[in-house]
Amino acid sequence: MSTTLDAPSSEHARTGSHPSTAWFLPLLRRLHFYAGIFVGPFLLVAALSGLLYVFTPQLEQAVYSESLTGTASAHPLSVDRQVEAARQTVGTDAAPVAVRPAPEGGTTRVMFADPALGRSESRGIFVDPGTGRVVGDMTVYGSSGALPLRTTVDRIHRDLLLGEPGRIYSELAASWLGVMAVSGLVLVVLHRRRVARGRRARVSLVPRPRDGNAFRRTRSWHTTAGVWLALGFVFLSVSGLTWSTYAGENVSRLRTALDWTTPTVATDLAPGSGSTGGDDEHAEHHGHQGHTAAAAPGSYDAVLATARDAGLDSQFVEIRPAAAEGTAWTVAENDRSWPTQVDSVAVDPSHLHVTDQKQFSEFGLPAKLTQWAIAAHMGLLFGLPNQVLLAVGLVVLVLSGYAMWWRRRPTRATGVAFGTVPPRGALRSTPPWAWPLVVLVTVVVGLFAPLLGLSLAGFLAVDLLVSAASRRRPGPSRQR
């Protein structure tokens, strides 16, 4: 693959850019191109697995219907009796780490710690509330209560089933998705400033499928989709990074430093205790969900009734027994379809009174935005459009990007030929005043999102080396 080295003056003449800023557009175009080529496969896997993930609740209902469907009964068994039935299956000495009473038409889920399972995994026993019969026994993952099918899809999306090393892929995808969206939007805006107003100025908002050759038609669809979906992609990038290994850790530190963590109930029964951020909203992805067994016996029905009296009205709740002597039980709403139903209470099991309570309405704005962002990223909000639009749009953009590259290949080349690439020379034409800015941006990005910073620095370094090698190559460059 050869590249034409346009002189800075010719680039200015060709683009019509002002000499003081003409270096920026070619650099941005080249960055957008190479990022798309090399990160495109990661984005494609993330989009397809993410699209599949948002449908896994429906798939779980179909695959595990026997374990998730309860018998209709006017007088269901008490939660205590259902828990006892689950304990008989696991072993009478076992104490549940959490219990999710059956919603309407469903089964009660009793979860036990199992040292043979991985982090954030528990053994789930499913009990029919109408008959008390155990109808399921399988591994449950995370605070979302994912069953094996959804867990597998989630891990493909997160780490390609490769464990911690595989999470590099998802962090790179999340990091570069935002860069690609913003750089593409800037390229469109700068390009529109150089063309006449009117019909040409609207081309980025409306595709022109009959315009010119196949390359121009593909570019029209690529540009239009990118403009309309750019904001959504930036949101997916930012929210996705909160689950990542390196950038996610920095996000957590920033939230803690700014006191943006989600409030949680205090479980210490000593007077004056309090808590402002114990549980992790991303527990189902990080593997931080606790598995401490109950320290003292108590009545699940009585604790649940106390929580209901305190205002917890969602049919989806989780009861967690006391983790140690002198601590309270907790009851928390976990309706994943609507992020405002996350109220929780701490209950003294001996005296059956609420010792602490947290309501979504009392959360600070950052904590509320976190709940909404998590639900939106996981496809739980706004129904089918949110589940499909961004994922399908990202697939279309990746494939159309590769199609444009392919359609720009030399038509008379023998053997395998690739499309042309944006010309080099942008870095060489960068004015002295801009170099500190480029370095500063790279360093700041690298500190907050290390994988993005390293890959960005690598791109700049390789581009400089290849450009230097091309200048030392004898003979003129071949014009494409």
Image (cartoon, rainbow, N blue to C red):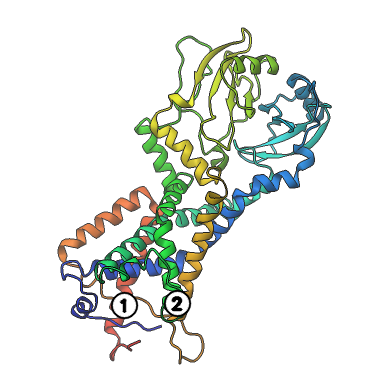
Q: Residues within 10 Å of mark 2 (few under 14, many from 20)?
A: few
Q: Residue at x 57, y 49 (%)?
A: 384
Q: Position of residue 447 (x, y in %)?
A: 34, 49
Q: Position of residue 43 (x, y in %)?
A: 50, 60
Q: Can I make out residue 262 in this image?
A: yes
Q: Residues within 10 Å of mark 1 (few under 14, many from 20)?
A: some
Q: Residue at x 70, y 45 (%)?
A: 60
* Amino acid tagged 1: Pro
Q: Residue at x 67, y 14 (%)?
A: 302
Relative side of 269 to 231, left or right: right
The one of 103 and 443 positioned closer to us in this rendering: 103
The one of 156 and 419 positioned closer to us in this rendering: 419
Question: In terms of secondary structure, where does tag 1 sit?
Answer: loop
Q: Above or below — where is 49 with respect to 368? A: below
Camera-side mark, 1 or 2: 2
Q: Which mark is residue 210?
A: 2
Relative side of 105 to 477, left or right: right
Relative side of 342 to 227, left or right: right
Question: In terms of secondary structure, where does tag 2 sit?
Answer: loop
Q: Which mark is residue 185?
A: none
Q: Position of residue 193 (x, y in %)?
A: 25, 66
- Cα separation, mark 1 vs mark 2, equals 28 Å
Disc 1 designates what residue? 423
* Amino acid tagged 2: Arg
Closer to the chain start, of discs 1 and 2, is 2
